[in-house]
Image: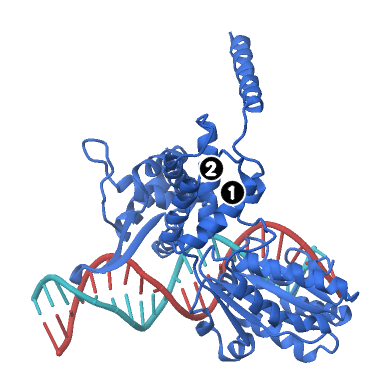
Chain colours: A blue, B red, C cyan
DNA sequence: AGTCCACAGGAAGGGCAGGCGA
DNA sequence: TCGCCTGCCCTTCCTGTGGACT
């Protein structure tokens, strides 16, 4: 019996794969639809590219370049335009037969890569082939080694710190002060910092000393409108999909949806790819507007499920306590139950005791609730209930399907 | 106007693991 | 092996908050 079942499922799998191979795919080159793909020409960002190029151009003649702050919301092309300019700067340098410009790109939000001062420095040293342990050395030793490497390299270094605000939130602005100060002691080398951030008010948060040295130049990336997004999507779709797979109507719908969300091109591309996948799995020969709607739901659900899945167990226990108390009504539908921190903590403590987990303090649980709020899994706001105290009202911010999926994902871990 | 409640949230520091150099 | 350093998770202590109640 077991053998029969195994044989049947194996032949099914074989069928799935052979059917997939026989079927004509809607995609021609999926890579071109990924937001990090760099096209030959970046649309609707000529002005910003020109600004950045002119700021960095002096490096070609061996002169120092200014520090730059680049602002703009998610998916406005900050990162790709910066990488695009870097790439062309290096190409232009090749023609001069010099090799003095070194460009380094670091995403400060990358967990365990550059999310602390130590890791940022370690990452910078690794760019110069310097071996640094993951932990153990004093930070000033790393600064010392970094200084020596810069001094010996005799390079004009352009350091791009993407999502710089994330690092600032975690460790303050001392690292920026130290990095900009290194130049005063360097003779033949120079380091220029390009800080990329979503936070328009980021500059105001910095210490006056850092602000004055960092804000030599500023570039603001405005959100794309629906027409611009449509152009961008058409450019990618022509490369990514077969000629019959996608229509202008579908592209326009994607663009319109993404334009509603602050002109986010990354979101627009994700919608397009997932819609293509949905259409393909359903056996369609082209993408329809309903596939875009399905893609929108799928992206949101996948994001939340993945976020929940990678949370530490204590955070999951807090979330489980919130979900358990978001009662279902008689028809089985979720009710918008407004919970208070105290109720959540009580239920959380019960869950922990029930499965032999350590019960954290209410102070710590309060921080975990804040973290869940920042991840947009729940939403909270502080309310004052007069003599009955000041607390937070907590609601789950997911649709019913997602909530059910999240519940079944974490329930098994605490039952 | 003063009191009270139930927290929010900042600051400081403890304890642990992992790693380094002497 | 020991002392020191870092990151991380956590606790403890404290002040602040704002609207209902007295």
Residue annotated with mark 1: A237
Residue A322 in the image: above or below residue A43: above
| Sequence-wise first label, 1 or 2 | 1
Q: Which of these two is toward me, A342 or A55?
A: A55
Position above or below: A75 against A94: above
Query: Mark 1 belongs to which subunit?
Result: A
Q: Is residue A63 left or right of residue A276?
A: right
Please say whether residue A358 is visible from this viewpoint: no
Label 1 crowd (10 A; few <14 / some 14-19 / many >=20): many
Left/right of residue A12 with respect to residue A396 in the rendered view: right
x, y (%) of residue A120? 69, 70
Q: Residue furthest right?
A: A97
* Front in this rendered view, residue A215 or A282: A282
Residue depicted at 61% across the width and 52% down the height: A236
- Side of A396 where A47 appears, left or right: right
Q: Which residue is drawn at the image coordinates 57% and 38% (left, top)?
A: A244
Q: Which residue is mark 2?
A: A246
Mark 1 and mark 2: Cα distance apart in space: 8 Å
- Image quadrant holding the N terminus of chain A, namely top right
The one nearer the camera, A362 or B8, is B8
Q: Secondary structure at mark 1?
A: helix
Q: Is the Cβ of the residue at disc 1 closer than 8 Å to that at disc 2?
A: yes
Residue for point 33% across, 45% down = A324
Give residue A157's position: percent from left, percent from top: 78, 77
């Amino acid at each position: 019996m077991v053998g029969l079942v195994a044989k049947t499922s194996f032949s099914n799998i074989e069928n799935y794969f052979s059917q997939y191979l026989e079927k004509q795919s809607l995609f021609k080159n999926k890579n071109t639809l990924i937001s990090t793909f760099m096209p030959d020409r970046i649309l609707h960002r000529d002005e910003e590219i020109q600004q950045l190029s002119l700021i960095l151009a002096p490096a070609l003649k061996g002169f120092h370049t200014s520090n730059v702050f680049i602002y703009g919301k998610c998916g406005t092309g900050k990162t790709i335009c910066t990488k695009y300019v870097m790439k062309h700067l290096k190409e232009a340098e090749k023609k001069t037969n010099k090799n003095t410009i070194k460009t380094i790109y670091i995403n400060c939000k990358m967990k365990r890569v550059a999310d602390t001062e130590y890791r940022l420095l370690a990452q910078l040293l690794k760019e110069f082939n310097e071996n640094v342990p993951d932990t153990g050395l004093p930070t000033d030793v790393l600064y010392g080694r970094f200084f020596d490497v810069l001094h010996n390299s005799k390079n004009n270094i352009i350091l791009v710190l993407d999502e710089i605000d994330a690092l600032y939130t975690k460790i303050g602005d001392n690292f920026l002060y130290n990095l900009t100060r290194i130049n005063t002691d360097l003779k033949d080398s120079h380091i220029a910092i390009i800080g990329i951030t979503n936070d328009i008010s980021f500059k105001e948060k910095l210490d006056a000393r850092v602000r004055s040295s960092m804000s030599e130049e500023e570039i603001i990336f405005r959100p794309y409108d629906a027409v611009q997004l449509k152009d961008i999507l058409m450019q990618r779709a022509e490369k990514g999909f077969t000629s019959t797979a996608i229509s202008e109507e579908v592209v326009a719908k994607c663009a319109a949806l993404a334009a509603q969300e602050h002109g986010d091109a990354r979101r627009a591309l994700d919608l397009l790819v997932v819609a293509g996948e949905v259409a393909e799995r359903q056996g369609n020969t082209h993408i329809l507007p309903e596939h875009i709607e399905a893609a929108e739901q799928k992206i949101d659900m996948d994001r939340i499920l993945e976020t929940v899945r990678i949370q530490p167990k204590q955070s999951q226990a807090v979330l489980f306590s919130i979900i358990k108390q978001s009662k279902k009504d008689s028809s089985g539908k979720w009710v918008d139950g407004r919970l208070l921190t105290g109720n959540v903590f009580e239920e959380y403590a019960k869950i922990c005791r029930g499965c032999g987990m350590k019960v954290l303090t209410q102070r710590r649980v309060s921080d975990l609730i804040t973290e869940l709020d920042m991840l947009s899994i729940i939403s909270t706001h502080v309310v004052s209930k007069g003599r009955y105290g000041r607390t937070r009202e907590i609601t789950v911010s997911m649709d019913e399907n997602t909530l059910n999926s999240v519940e079944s994902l974490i329930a098994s871990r605490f039952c």
